[in-house]
Image (cartoon, helix red, strand yellow):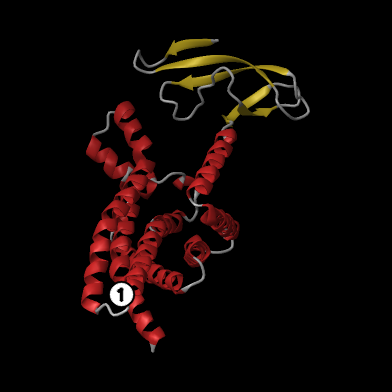
Amino acid sequence: NETEYYEFGKENPFYIQEITATVMNGDLKGETVHFENLRTTSGLSCFDIRESDSVIVNLNSDGTVNSVDNIKRDHYVVLLIGIFCIALYAISTKQSGPVLFATILNLGVFVGVLLLRPQFDVFILFIFGTILFTVITLFITAGFNKKSLYAVLSTLISVTIMIMLAMIVLKINETFIAFEAVDYVDYLYDYKSVFYSGVLISGLGAIMDTSIIMATSINELIEKDPQIDTKALKKSAWEIAQDITGTIMNVLLFSCVAGALPNVIFVISSGGMALDFAFEYFAMAEVIRALVGCIGIILAVPVSYIVNIAMRKRWAA
């Protein structure tokens, strides 16, 4: 049952849900419990419980529900992982194993960084993590070969230049960054390091994509025509770069801005805040991450070309 109430006028109703549920696990498994749940129209800080939903609750020893902690969604995650694995295997049978293995290793590195955070600065940890992410991803998915080595070098050089430029500009203008709008900033003692770590990591995947595509393309061009001159190789590499950079930058921009979309929509619809102010205050952190990543993608093009040509000449010598 659900009862509707009005406290601040007709625009902002809230609801008291009377829930009858069955305990699914623990000492009271199989027992029927009754509790109330507060639901608001925005859904910002509460849960809309529906029939057949599974919820995680704080259950007292006497069988009463103290609080609703979350909606149980792990079965959706398992389903998506299953679909991802099947689709990956169907598209690329040979690469599915290495891709999954690299993903698991990267998750392990990420968990290790989080566990070490209380002892070390999280930004320094993610700098080392970035090196490991790059080496693991490119060498395992693309194989242990010259192409992967060039892509690793190009990625690390591009990321280094990108984060150095970003740190200089952001540090100069740090007072204009709305850190207070970053999620959970009140609970993070190292929120600035967390923010800069996000800036570092957000563009890494896109830079790796650019670097491996450039390395593969240049490798194919040279293998098909070993006598190709540098001018023609540069022209072909530049045309390839023009085809890939636009789409990769847009993917990065869309994925970053999507993280701020719920907050922006909420403050516009519920708080009556102007769009430009809401975007500047609540989406600026995501926009910064996207723009820094785009700079890294642009840098990866000439860096990849220079690294591939220089290393091939050195290898040939």
315, above or below 24, in the image: below
Most foreground residue, 315 or 268: 315
List the single residue furthest toward the front: 224
183, above or below 206, in the image: above
- Asked whether, in this view, residue 2 is left or right of residue 286, the answer is right
Residue 35 percent coordinates (x, y): 63, 17
List the single residue furthest toward the right: 27
* Amino acid at the residue labelled 1: Asp
Residue 196 percent coordinates (x, y): 41, 58
Q: Secondary structure at mark 1?
A: loop
The answer to whether one can see residue 63 in this image is yes
Residue 180 percent coordinates (x, y): 38, 46
Query: Which quadrant, please, contains the N terminus?
Result: top right
- Asked whether, in this view, residue 148 is left or right of residue 115, the answer is left
According to the image, label 1 marks what residue? 225
Q: Residue at x 21, y 76 (%)?
A: 231
Q: Residue at x 45, y 17 (%)?
A: 14
Total marks in image? 1
Quadrant for residue 316, please give it: bottom left
280, above or below 137, in the image: above
Q: Residue at x 54, y 21 (%)?
A: 49
The answer to whether one can see residue 285 in this image is no
Residue 162 percent coordinates (x, y): 33, 65
Most foreground residue, 232 or 254: 232
Query: Which quadrant, please, contains the C terminus?
Result: bottom left
Within 10 angstroms of label 1, few (less than 14), some, or many (20 or more) residues?
Answer: few
- Asked whether, in this view, residue 189 is left or right of residue 258, the answer is right
Quadrant for residue 72, please give it: top right
Quadrant for residue 257, please give it: top left
